[in-house]
Image: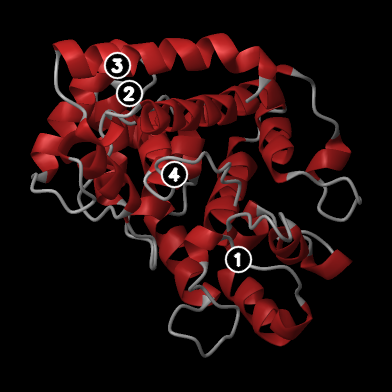
Amino acid sequence: MWPTRQQQHAQISSALHSHSANVRNLPGAAVNLARDTLAMQFVASLRREDYYRRVQEKLVTARKADPNSGSFDAERAVAYHMQNGNVEEAAWLVFLMTHFARPASSGWLRLQQVYGRLGTGVWDWQTVLNNPQAMTSWLAANSMNIGGKFGNHRKYESLRPNSNRCFGDILLSYVGWIGPAGHQAFFAAKIQQTGNNPATIFDAIYRSMSVKTFGRLAKFDYLALIGRYGIAPIEPGSAYFKGATGPASGARLLFTGSHTGAATEAQLQNWVDELDAGLQVGMAVMEDALCNWQKSPTAFVHFKG
């Protein structure tokens, strides 16, 4: 337990108990141990959201954004570019963060070495936009020299140029999706098309996303980061259970008592909407907490990678 979060944990656990008694039964969290474990996962997810806010509150130095400085930090690099008005580079880094993800064992090493051309430069957005094939060719020639790993959510990706999940194809699909005018123009057009509701804009972009190998989770993670950093005024209004494994399993366990309990995606969404009316944590936290909780429902595990 994080000492400063004890009160928050108690409040969430109490709210879960109250919801189960007064709104909808939560058989998956009927026993105190399961309910307290779920509450702890909500606390952990809220801490992650707070972390992104703290990263952006302080002035970030250029060294944190330089992959070859020895002080590179991907989360702070995005904040640095936003603080300096470089929305294009910030959004590009969010894409790289989503694609490579962050394993607990090696952190951002793989992203850093690719982004920093193994110490010989930077594959910045403008360079890549002008000639994406140059980055693809460089990666094909240097893939064996790149360390680190892909994160757990992207563990099936490969740096091999002959892979059916090779980065070159993914990069070209991303550049094609964003378009030659860049991220700022892309997001501005979506806002103009859909209006000012953050959830509606999120949904429109989510449904338009045609990046190779980006399934439901990668789309959700990418857009959640875009919203957290203020690159676009968006936030998820849904947990996007269609195509989900962990979050849907967690929701089924909570509301039916079984990972495979009978419930449609629409029912699950209605039920988590009801729950969030009391918890007020938002769908990004709801999705993350349910996914992590269902892996270990009665013993808290702090999932980092």
Image position of 71 with respect to 139: above or below: above
Badge 1 vs badge 2, beta-carbon distance below 8 Å: no
Residue 153, can we see it? yes
For mark 4, what is the residue? Answer: 292
For mark 1, what is the residue? Answer: 150
For mark 2, what is the residue? Answer: 198
SS category of the residue bearing label 1: loop
Looking at the rendered structure, the kind of residue marked 1 is: Phe
Q: Earlier in the sequence, mark 1 or mark 3?
A: 3
Query: In the depicted view, which residue is nearer to us: 152 or 109?
Result: 152
Looking at the rendered structure, the kind of residue marked 3 is: His
Q: CA distance from mark 1 to mark 3?
A: 38 Å
For mark 3, what is the residue? Answer: 17
At 80% from the left edge and 28% from the top edge, which residue is drawn?
A: 60
Query: In the depicted view, which residue is nearer to us: 266 or 95?
Result: 266
Q: Is residue 75 left or right of residue 29?
A: right
